[in-house]
Image: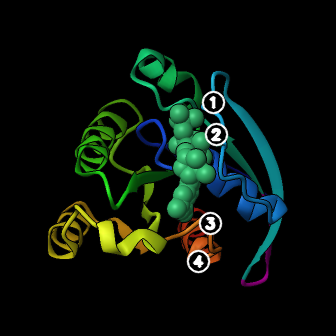
Amino acid sequence: MRLKVVLLGEGRVGKTSILFRYIRNEFQEKQQSTLQASYMDKRIKVGSVDAQLSVWDTAGQERFHALGPIYYRDADGALLVYDITDSESFTKVRKWVKELRKIVGNDINIVIAGNKIDLERNRQVSEAEVLEYAKSVGASHFYTSAKQNLGLEECFNELATKMVAQ
Ligand code: GTP
């Protein structure tokens, strides 16, 4: 079973880093901004189902926003990433949820990742706010750190489970 996942979120929140850590177990402190979307594949098992995830990394900078639909239109699921030290990036998640629901439909599987949890001391986004929001839109929420390799398996497993069940 082939499943397409798209990573969406503001520039610099850590989308590319999440992809590299999850698929290659690599991390770069000076990861450059993505200018062109690309994808990597990973085989995972969801219960008894063999799934091949194609995980698409998109460019987060606002000037690339209009390209979004090219990547998410036929996606089975979206991982919406924000940076816990940047409240603007969480506001952007709300926009993505609205846009995905409007264009792809209400059935799109969404998981929200609060990345850079290793920088908890600089947290700007309150946990209560995030959990309430995630619940209100029926999305799961995980804290992740691409730097310290935290929460990533959980995010992708949850998304894959939702997609397989659909
Ligand atoms: P765009 O390509 O501009 O959309 O950015 P992006 O969302 O792909 O972010 P990227 O992976 O390029 O990471 C941006 C910066 O944040 C890089 O310097 C990363 O090293 C850093 N970074 C990514 N994830 C983490 C994390 O979990 N913790 C910390 N401390 N830094 C991180």
Q: Which mark is residue 147?
A: 3
Q: Secondary structure at mark 1?
A: loop
Which stretch is magenta?
47-52
**The residue tagged with tag 3: helix, strand or loop?**
loop
The amino acid at mark 3 is Lys
Ligand 1 has an atom within 8 Å of the beta carbon of the residue at disc 1: yes
In the rendering, at what x and y percent does residue 19 appear?
69, 53
Instruction: Give the amino acid at mark 2.
Output: Asp
Q: Position of residue 110 (x, y in %)?
A: 43, 57
First of labels 4, 1 by sequence position: 1
Which mark identifies residue 150? 4
Q: Which residue is mark 1?
A: 34
C-alpha span from label 3 to label 2: 17 Å
Q: Main secondary structure of the magenta part?
A: strand
Mark 1 or 3: the one toward you: 3
Q: Is mark 4 within 8 Å of ligand 1?
A: yes
Respond yes or no on whether mark 2 lies under 8 Å from ligand 1. yes
Residue 57 is labelled as 2
Place residue 165 in its image quadrant: bottom right
Q: Are the two marked residues, 4 and 3, in contact with CB atoms closer than 8 angstroms?
A: no
Mark 3 or mark 2: whose residue is earlier in sequence: 2
* Residue nearer the viewer, 10 or 101: 10
In the displayed structure, 27 sits above or below 76; it is below
For the residues labelled 2 and 1, the Cα–Cα distance comes to: 8 Å
Q: Earlier in the sequence, mark 2 or mark 1?
A: 1
